Image: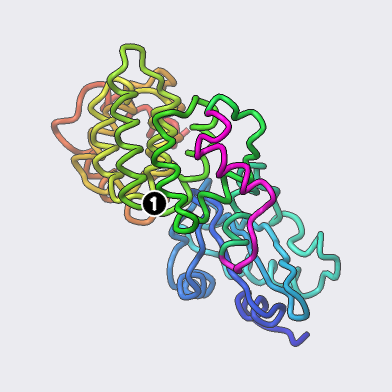
Amino acid sequence: MTQTSSIQNFLQQTGSGFQVFDLGRRIQPVPENIFTDFETGKIPWPWPLQQQAWLGMMLQQQNNDELVIWFVRLPLDNRGYLDSKIRHDFLQRLQTTESQDNKTGNPYGFKPKPEQMAVFHARAAAQFNQPPSRFYTHARDYFAGISGYDQWAFVGFQGIADMAARLQQDNNEQLLASALPNLPAQPFEALCQCLEHEQIGDTLATALMQKLEQLLAQNETDASLISYCLRALSGSNQLQQAVQTVLAHRSATHADVLAAIAGRGWIALSDEKQMLVYLENLAQCVQGQDFFTAVIADLVNIPGMQQPIHQSMRNPQRSAALARAIGGMFKQFSS
């Protein structure tokens, strides 16, 4: 194969089709122009996690329909950009290593969690017009209530992921929206883990909001289920309202809830007022100073988050608790 100076060109030359996915905060396809601008150093990575770009590179082979997948994590500099030396080293490994299993090589390769793998394979199959897994029909029957909502133990996670990746097919969105009020905790959590990577429509988002409001109204708050609900709403146009509602609730100081907002619903914090409310709750979290510092360190690396964070931290109306947490954070950064 002809040597190339571009990762994207290499992918184009290797297969008959390719798609790069972000696997960091949400599993989502990366537009070609975004990846090109990132690779050439024009923009920082839009979705950094732990100061790395987590990628799934999927190629359709030229002689058949088989998909080849490489999982890659590329370190970012302190501004979120890809260092040209890292890009060159990674590209050299792709071009010179014959073994498919080692093409990504150390230190760039990684193995996604099983849930991520299921969602990724579901998205990949849908994108390349391949059929869903054998678990798909069983999952649809379950959410239709055919076998009873208590019979969830044998529903394959891959089937749920396939449904989430095909919301606009087979009436799946309406099916899931109708099932939501009846689901036990375990299948509800599994469904939310899949939906958090999808753009969902108003029908399903409204059902999730109703579920969220019911959870918030309970005397004994289940912060874990609230966090799953928020994550599932992260790809909806009701995310802003959901985050605002939760931040006004007593569950907002729980680590699971705070992590869900920062990890999946950070877009809702782009407003300075909303960010200040979030930081006030973060400062009250029982996980303490280390958790506060870690969340801020993660958020501040996301493009567009620096300004609302800095403005909120300088807000003269901030509480004494928040001021102490900010002071503790700077001590940790300087130590």
* Position of residue 318 in the picture relative to residue 75 (left or right): left
| SS of the residue under disc 1 | loop
Q: Position of residue 282 (x, y in %)?
A: 34, 28
Residue 144 in magenta?
yes
Query: In the picture shown, does residue 122 fall above or below 326?
Result: below
Residue with the most extreme front position: 146
Residue with the most extreme left position: 317
Question: Which quadrant holds residue 158?
Answer: top right
Q: Position of residue 130 (x, y in %)?
A: 64, 65
Q: Residue at x 43, y 27 (%)?
A: 225
* Position of residue 3 in the picture relative to residue 232 (left or right): right
Residue 108 in magenta?
no
Along the line of sight, which residue is nearer the eye, 162 or 50?
Answer: 162
To which residue does mark 1 refer? 200
- The N terminus, quarter of image: bottom right
Q: Residue at x 41, y 20 (%)?
A: 222
Q: Position of residue 14 (x, y in %)?
A: 72, 78
Mark 1: which amino acid?
Ile
Whether residue 296 is visible, yes or no, is no
* Position of residue 71 in the picture relative to residue 187 (left or right): right
- The coloring applied to the image is rainbow
The residue segment tinted magenta is 127-148
Q: Residue at x 69, y 56 (%)?
A: 108
* Position of residue 262 in the picture relative to residue 19 (left or right): left
Whether residue 177 is visible, yes or no, is yes
